[in-house]
Image (cartoon, grey):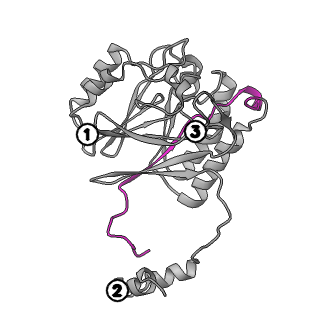
Amino acid sequence: MTSFSQYPEPDRTLVHLSDTHFLADHGPLFGQVDTDRGLRRALDRLRAELGRADLIVITGDVADRGEPDAYERVAEIVEPAAADLGAELLWVMGNHDERRPFSSRLWDAATDEALDRTLMIGGLRVIALDSTVPGYHHGELTDDQLGRLADTLAEPAPHGTILALHHPPLPTRVKLMGLVELRAADRLAEVITGTDVRAILAGHLHYSTFGTFAGIPVSVAAASCYTIDPLPGERRFDGIDRNHAFSLVDVFADRIVHSVVPIDSAEPVSAYSAEYLAELAAMTPAERDEAFSRKTP
């Protein structure tokens, strides 16, 4: 298809999902939320409308209670979709996850150690950091993890580095979440400042939000199970079964673009047909300006 833009196609496209929160035996979350539905719908949209991707990264809370059956069911849903998209998979630990059953099924090697991993997608380096603290819901990175990260980042990757961790190094409007945020985040900032880290992907908050940390863009993906209203009132905490979303991360040579994608598509109130788009594609740039860009009376 003829490009309508001054920008090239992205070099890499990553799918960023988060917080699936599966329970064993297909149990409904909070007794009413069908966690399978949101994840399946997201993957169905990707198959039908994206077609291919380089990586699917899931930034934690894969299971709500760390149950082996929950990990098995998530994997049985995600792995075939990744194969259909031609994408590699990167699973990141979240505070609701438990390291041994998580690693046993998703990393094929049971361990109780911190689950950090480095993956190369061509020249793009993606690093998963395990920000969980066993037995607690807040996040923190150990001295050993930060030391290993510094050693890895000492040598730049050809196309730079993306970090993925569950707890975002950002403040949140949901005040209660401050109790379970990433603690001592300044220590991470010291390690990544001046390195080739181009973006940070996170989850945990259950709503889409963006910011910068150590001068680096941070993108937080909403959840596929339930979301949190970021403006429910100063002293309230409302989880809602709507506004489910994931993110697409398009990596270019000189920039990274994050797009929030609703899991449920909606009926259009206006649309341009495929035939009209084909007509535009056949035009010269000047003809397109007259046919599309020029304002009509």
Residue 8 spot, x, y in % from top left: 33, 64
Q: Compute the Cα span from label 3 to label 1.
A: 39 Å
Residue 31 drawn above or below residue 261: above
Q: Nearer the viewer, mark 2 or mark 3?
A: 3
Where residue 185 appears, as percent x and y from the top left, is 36, 23
For discs 3 and 1, the disc positioned in front in the rendered view: 3
Please state, as top left, top right, bottom left or bottom right, where the N terminus lies in the image: bottom left
The residue nearer to you, when weighing 253 against 216, is 216
Dot 2 falls on a residue whose secondary structure is: helix
Q: Which residue is tagged 2?
A: 286
Residue 100: name its quadrant: top right
Q: Magenta includes 20?
A: yes
Q: CA distance from mark 2 to mark 1?
A: 40 Å
| Helix, strand or loop at mark 3 | loop
Q: At label 3, which amino acid type do we have?
A: Leu
**Left or right of residue 186: residue 109:** right
Q: Residue at x 65, y 70 (%)?
A: 269
For the residues labelled 2 and 3, the Cα–Cα distance comes to 45 Å
Disc marking residue 157: 1
Our reading of the magenta stretch's main secondary structure is: loop
Q: Is residue 137 above or below residue 60?
A: above
The residue identified by callout 3 is 231
Mark 3 nearby-residue class (10 Å; few <14, some 14–19, many ≥20)? few
**Magenta stretch in the rendered image:** 1-30
Estimate how packed mark 2 is, as few (under 14), some (14 to 19) or many (20 or more) residues with alpha carbons within 10 Å.
few
Q: Is residue 72 above or below residue 2?
A: above
Name the N-terminal-most of marks 2 and 1: 1
Mark earlier in primary sequence (3, 1): 1
State the residue at coordinates (32%, 54%).
Answer: 252
Q: Earlier in the sequence, mark 2 or mark 3?
A: 3
- Location of residue 123 with respect to 97 vertically, above or below: below
